[in-house]
Amino acid sequence: MARLLIVAGIVLVAAGLAIKAGLPLGRLPGDIVVRRGGGTFYFPIVTCVLVSVVLSLISAIWRR
């Protein structure tokens, strides 16, 4: 459990630094944005796929 918490903390810090450095995480081409009237619906599908692939790679490397 301790190892999981350490890795989760490192991942969150890395994501924060990447966003601070200007990486457009959450604003990638292919993300769905619908603006109608006074509301906005935003679904970051490409961002979700990218995060899923990265987490899958980390998980595969971790298991070895």
Image: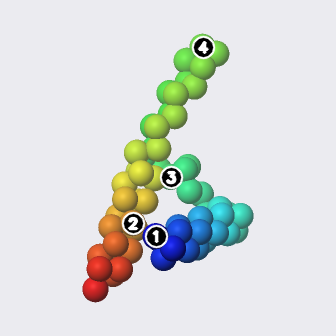
> Which numbered marker is on residue 1?
1
The tag earlier along the polypeptide, 1 or 3, is 1
Front position among marks 1 and 2 = 1
Is residue 30 shown left or right of residue 27? left
Secondary structure of the residue carrying numbered label 1? loop
Residue neighbourhood size for the residue with mark 2, other residues' Cα within 10 Å, grouped as few (<14), some (14–19), many (≥20): few
Is residue 21 shown left or right of residue 62? right
Which residue position holds label 3? 28
Secondary structure of the residue carrying numbered label 3? loop
Quarter in which the C terminus is drawn = bottom left
Q: Residue furthest right?
A: 20
Q: Residue furthest top?
A: 37
Secondary structure of the residue carrying numbered label 4? loop
Front position among marks 4 and 2 = 2
Front position among marks 2 and 3 = 2
The tag earlier along the polypeptide, 2 or 3, is 3
Task: Find residue 29 and report its horizontal and vertical position in percent.
Answer: 47, 50
Residue found 55% across the figure and 50% down from its top = 26
Compared to residue 1, the image places residue 49 above or below, namely above
Disc 2 marks a residue whose amino acid type is Leu
Residue neighbourhood size for the residue with mark 3, other residues' Cα within 10 Å, grouped as few (<14), some (14–19), many (≥20): some
Disc 4 marks a residue whose amino acid type is Gly
Residue 1 visible? The answer is yes
Is residue 21 shown left or right of residue 29? right
The tag earlier along the polypeptide, 4 or 3, is 3
Q: Hey, which quadrant is residue 51 in on the image?
A: bottom left
The tag earlier along the polypeptide, 4 or 1, is 1
Is residue 52 shown left or right of residue 34? left
